[in-house]
Image (spheres, coloured by chain):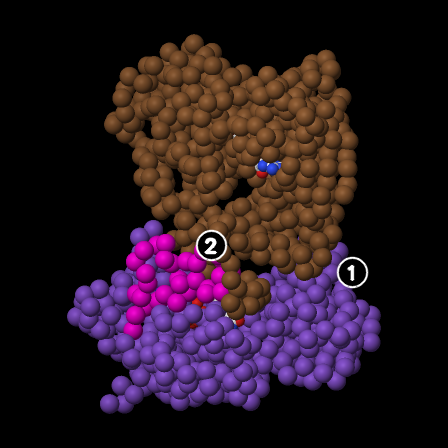
Chain colours: A brown, B purple
Amino acid sequence: MRRIETDIIVIGGGATGAGIARDVSMRGLRCVLIEKNDLASGTTGRNHGLLHSGARYAVKDLESARECIRENRILKKIARHCVEDTGGLFVTLPEDDPMYHRNLIEGCRFAGINAREITVRRALQIEPNLNPAILSALHVPDGTIDPFRLTSANALDASERGAIIMTHTRVNAIIRNGTRVEGVSCIDRKNEQLDIYGSVVINASGVWGQEICSMAGIELAMFPSKGSMLIIDYRINGVVVNRCRPPADGDIIVPGDTVSLIGTTSMEVPYEKIHDNNVTDEEIEVLLSDGEKLIPNVSRTRALRAYSGVRPLIAVSGENTGRNISRGIALIDHNTRDGLEGLITIAGGKLMTYRLMAEKATDLACRKAGVSRKCTTHKVPLPGSEKGISRRRRIKEFSGIPDSVVGSTFYRHGQRLQSIMTREKRNYRLICECEMVTEGEIEYAIKNLNVKDLVDLRRRTRIGMGPCQGELCAYRGSGLLQEYGGASPEESVELLQDFLEERWKGVRPVLWGDGLRESEFTYWIYQGLFGISRPVKIKKKRTD
Amino acid sequence: MKYDALIIGGGLAGLTCGIRCAAAGLRTAILSGGMNSLHFSSGSVDLAGYDDEGELVKKPFEQVKKICRARKDHPYAKAGLPAVKKAMEFFIETTSNAGLTMNHNGDMNHFHITGLGTLKPAYLSQESVFGPRGLEIVNSGGKIAVMNFSGFRDYYPEQTVAYLKKNRIFADRDIVLGEISLPWYMNTQKNMHEFRSTDLARIFETEKYLPRIAEEIRKGAGDATAVSLPAFLGIKNYRAIRKRLEELTGKFIYEIPTLPPSILGLRIDQALKDSFIGYGGEFIAGERAESGPVDSGLLEHINTRNSGIEPVSAKYYVLATGSFFSGGLTSNSQRIMEPVFNFKVDADSKRSKWYSWFFFDAKSHPFLSYGVRTDKNFNPVNEKGNTVKNVFCAGAVLSGYDPVREGCGGGVAISSGFACAGKIIGELKK
Ligand SMILES: Cc1cc2nc3c(=O)[nH]c(=O)nc-3n(C[C@H](O)[C@H](O)[C@H](O)COP(=O)(O)OP(=O)(O)OC[C@H]3O[C@@H](n4cnc5c(N)ncnc54)[C@H](O)[C@@H]3O)c2cc1C
Ligand SMILES: Cc1cc2nc3c(=O)[nH]c(=O)nc-3n(C[C@H](O)[C@H](O)[C@H](O)COP(=O)(O)OP(=O)(O)OC[C@H]3O[C@@H](n4cnc5c(N)ncnc54)[C@H](O)[C@@H]3O)c2cc1C
C-alpha cells in the first residue's frame, strides 16, 4: 500500500475540483486531487457550456445573476482559450408572455447586466437562422465555455505549480480519527490501494457528494435533477439563443466549436439513478420540437449525439424533504454543521461559477490550515490564455502548415500552441480530420494532460467528436496511445473498443438519417473488417 | 426502349448481375451513383462465416444449404443452393478472366489476417493475402515479419503481432516488426505522413522504386520467410509488383487489409467493371436514379438526377443500391425507407428496436438485416402492396440476413445479383 502526505486533498476532478487544486497551489499549499474517472467526466462534461450573462436568472434569482455576470467578465479574461464571446439573444415567440421581456430588462438592470433591446430585423441579421416570427429580442453578453478545456487548463496549472492530479483513482473511504478527518483511502487504476493524509479534505464531488459524506459517517442529501441535451451537427447558430420566458425545457441553443447544442430537459431523479445517463425518445422529441421553435432548421439538421447530466442540487440545512434546496453555491464546513473537523463540502453553483466556488472553498481550507494568502485566480490567466497570438504571427511562425490546422490547435490550446506544434511534418499531420486534431496535439495531450485512455484523449483534443464520431481516427488514436502513452498493443485495442462503446451511448438515442449511415459504416470497419470482437456469445449485463 | 436490363447501383451485386446479363447478349446498363462498398471492404468474399450460434463455419456451402432449408426469407434460400454455387463459380471465372485470381480452399473456408491480427473466415481471397499458402509456411516453422510503411497513419503492426500471438497457430512462432522507409521519396512529397493506401500504392506502381523497396524489406525482415505489408501493393500491376518483390527478396509477401480506401477491394471493383464493359455493357458513372412510377405494378421508367427531360426505360430493372451506407436505404426519426421507389421494407417500426444496446453486441444490430422486402423471385412490393414484376432486387438492399454476424455480405451480393440476371434472361427467352 502506498501512502502520500499532503496539505489539502480534493475529491473530484470536475471544474470545481480542478479550480480548487489550482487555487490551493497558487496559495503555496501542497495538494492532491483524486478523480475516480477522468477530468470533466462528471456533470462538468455534461452540460451545455453556456457562459451565462446572468440574464437567465435575472428575474427570479438576483444573487445568482450577479454572480454570473461577475464571473462572466473574469473568465473572458483569464480563460480566453476556453471561452467564446459570442453574445446572446433572448427572443420572444408569439406564444410567449410578452411581459417577460420587460421584466427581464428590469432584472438585468438590477443585476448590472448589459442587456440591449434590439429590433427583430437586427436580431435576424445577427442570427439569420432564427425563427422570423419572433416578436422581440434582447441582446445580452452570454458566451460559451468549453468545460473540458477549462478543467484541463486548471488541472494543468495546478500540476505545473506542484499539485498531484490523480485520475482514474477512486476515493472509497474517508480516514477518520474521532471527530477529525485525516485523509482518504483510494483505489487506483491498477486496483492498488493508496492512502492520502492531509489537514483538510475538500469534497468537490458534485452530485456524488452524498456518497462521500456517508463515507465520513455524516448525512448530506442531494436532490439530483437530470437534464438532457442534443448535439446538432454543424454550428447552426453563431450566438447563444435563449427563449424569453421563465426557464423551462428546450429553451436554449448554444453554439460550441463545430456544433450546436439544444438544451435542456429537467427531471428530478432518485439518487440511485444518477448514473443512468440514457436519453429517452420522448426527451429527444421535446428537444427537437422546442428547438425548432427557436431555429426552424433544427429538425432538418443531423442530430449527432444526445447525452444527459445531473445537476447537484443540495439541501443545505440538513433536512431531507427537499423544500430548502439551494440552487446557488453551497459551502459546508462540516465542523460547524456536523462537528466533524477537517472536511469541507462545496457543491451546487454552475460550471461558470467554478472559480468562485473554488475561491470560497479554498478560503475556508486556508483558514483551517492557518494560511493567509489571498486568492488571485481572478487575475492570473490560465495556461494558454496568457495573451493572444495574432493570426499574422501564427501564419509567419508556422508557415507551410495549413492555416486551418494551426488555427484549430490554437483555438483549443491557446498560447500552448507553441509547445505543441513544430514544423516537422509528422507533428502536424492530421489524425482526426473532422476536428483537425494533429499528431502533435495528441502527443502533447498524452504526455501532459493526464490522458489514460481514448475517451480522456477525446476530452482533451476533440478527437472523434465530429460528424463521423471516430470512424477512422479512433483506430489511429489507439495506435498513438501505444506510441506516446505506453499502452501495450492489447490495451490499445481494448481502449479502442471501450471508446467506440462510449461513442455509441450518445449516438444510440439519435440513430437515424446520417447517424445510422455512419454507424453502419463504423460497425463494418471495426467488426466486419477488423473483427474487433468475434461475434460469439459475450454475456454482458444491460447497464452502463 | 433502349435497354433490356437497367441496373441501378454498381456495387458487387449490380456488377455481377450486369456482367451476366451482358455476357448473355442483353443490352445492359448500370447506373452508378457513387463509390460502392468494395472500396471499403476487405477484398475477400464471405460466403458463410458464422453459424446461428456465432461459431465458425468450416464448410460454407453446408451452411448455405442449412439456411436454404430453414430460413426461406434469406436471399440464399430465394436463389437456391445450386444458383449460389454457380454464382461463385461464375464470379471466380469472371475475375480470373479479368486478371484477378480469387483463391479458395476447396469447399472449406480459409482465414485471412486482419489489421488487428484477428483471423477472419472467408470463402474467396486474393492470392496476395495470407490464405492457405501463408498457413503452410507458418506450419512449417517459418519466421514472420509484420511490416509497415514508416509513418503510415492507417496501420499499427504492433497490434497485429499482439493478437496473432494469441492464436495457437502463431503462439510460438517468431514474429518480428519491421519498417520500410523511403526518406529520399519523402522529401519530394507534400506530407507523406498523411498518405493513404492509394498514395502508397502509387509508389509501388513505380517500377524503378521496387529494388529499393525490396532492399528495405530485406533489411527490416531479416531472416523471416513470410512478410506482411498493409494492402497497398498497387491497384493496377499488383501481380507483377508482388512477383518482383518476392523475387528480389526471396520471401513470401502477403497483404493485410486496413483502413479504407481498400486497395484489395478496388482491384475487384476494377476487374468487374473491365469485364462488364468488355461484354459491351454501358457503365454510367455519377448518375443516380431519383424516382420512377410503379403505380400499375410495373415500373414504367426511371428519372435520374442528370437526365432531365428524358426518362430512362428498360424491359427489366434491378435495384442494387446497397444498404444505408450507399444510400439504398434511408431513415428519418420515424421509419426506414427505400428512397427511390418507396418499396416496402422489412424493419421494426419502433426506433428503439433498430439497434442493440452495446455497439459490439454479440447479436450485432437489427438494422443490419433491414432491407427491401421481396418475394421468392426477388420482386419488391410497392406502396400499394402490389408486387412489381419487372424489378428485381439484389445485394445489400435486401432484407433477411445480417452480413456481419453471418459473414455472408459478399456471397449474398454475388448470388442474388447472379440470380436476378438469371431471372431476366429467363423472362426474355419466353
Ligand atoms: C443539464 C445541465 C445543464 C447545465 N448547463 C450549464 C451551463 O450551461 N452553464 C453552467 O455554467 N452550468 C451548467 N450546468 C451546471 C454545471 O454543469 C455544474 O454545476 C458543474 O459542472 C458542477 O461541477 P462540479 O465540479 O462541482 O461537479 P462534477 O463535474 O460532477 O465533478 C465531480 C467529480 O467528482 C468525481 N467523483 C465522484 N465520486 C468520487 C469518488 N468517490 N472518488 C473520486 N472522484 C469522485 C466525479 O467523477 C466527478 O468528475 C448544467 C448542469 C446540467 C445538469
Ligand atoms: C465497409 C464495408 C466493408 C465490407 N467488407 C466486406 C468483406 O470484407 N467481405 C464481404 O464479403 N463483404 C463485405 N462487405 C459487404 C459487402 O461488400 C456488401 O454486402 C456488398 O458489397 C454489397 O454490394 P451491393 O452491390 O449490394 O452494394 P454496394 O456495394 O453498397 O453498392 C451500391 C451502389 O449503388 C449506388 N447507388 C445507391 N443508390 C443509387 C441510386 N439511387 N442510383 C444509382 N446508384 C445508386 C451506390 O453509389 C453504390 O455504388 C462490406 C461492406 C461494407 C460497407
> What number is the disc on residue B184?
1
- Whether B353 is among the magenta residues is yes
Chain bearing tag 2 is A
Mark 1 secondary-structure assignment: helix
Chain bearing tag 1 is B
Q: Quadrant of residue B296?
A: bottom left
Q: Main secondary structure of the magenta part?
A: loop
Please determine whether, in this image, residue B145 is positioned above or below residue A269: below
Give the quarter of the figure containing the N terminus of chain B.
bottom left
Residue A490, position as x, y percentages in the image: 67, 60
Q: Residue at x 48, y 51 (%)?
A: A543
- Label 2 belongs to which residue? A542
In space, the residues marked 2 and 1 are separated at their CA atoms by 54 Å
Specify the segment rendered in magenta: B345-374
Residue B49, position as x, y percentages in the image: 51, 77
Q: Residue at x 53, y 54 (%)?
A: A501
Kind of residue at badge 1: Trp
Q: Nearer the viewer, mark 2 or mark 1?
A: 2
Residue B140 visible within the image: yes
Residue A86 visible within the image: no
Kind of residue at badge 2: Arg
Q: Residue at x 31, y 52 (%)?
A: B334
Q: Residue at x 54, y 16 (%)?
A: A70
Residue A364, position as x, y percentages in the image: 64, 17
Mark 2 secondary-structure assignment: loop
Q: Nearer the viewer, residue B313 or A363?
A: A363
**If the picture is divided into quarters, which one holds ligand 2?**
bottom left
Please determine whether, in this image, residue B293 is positioned above or below residue A6: below
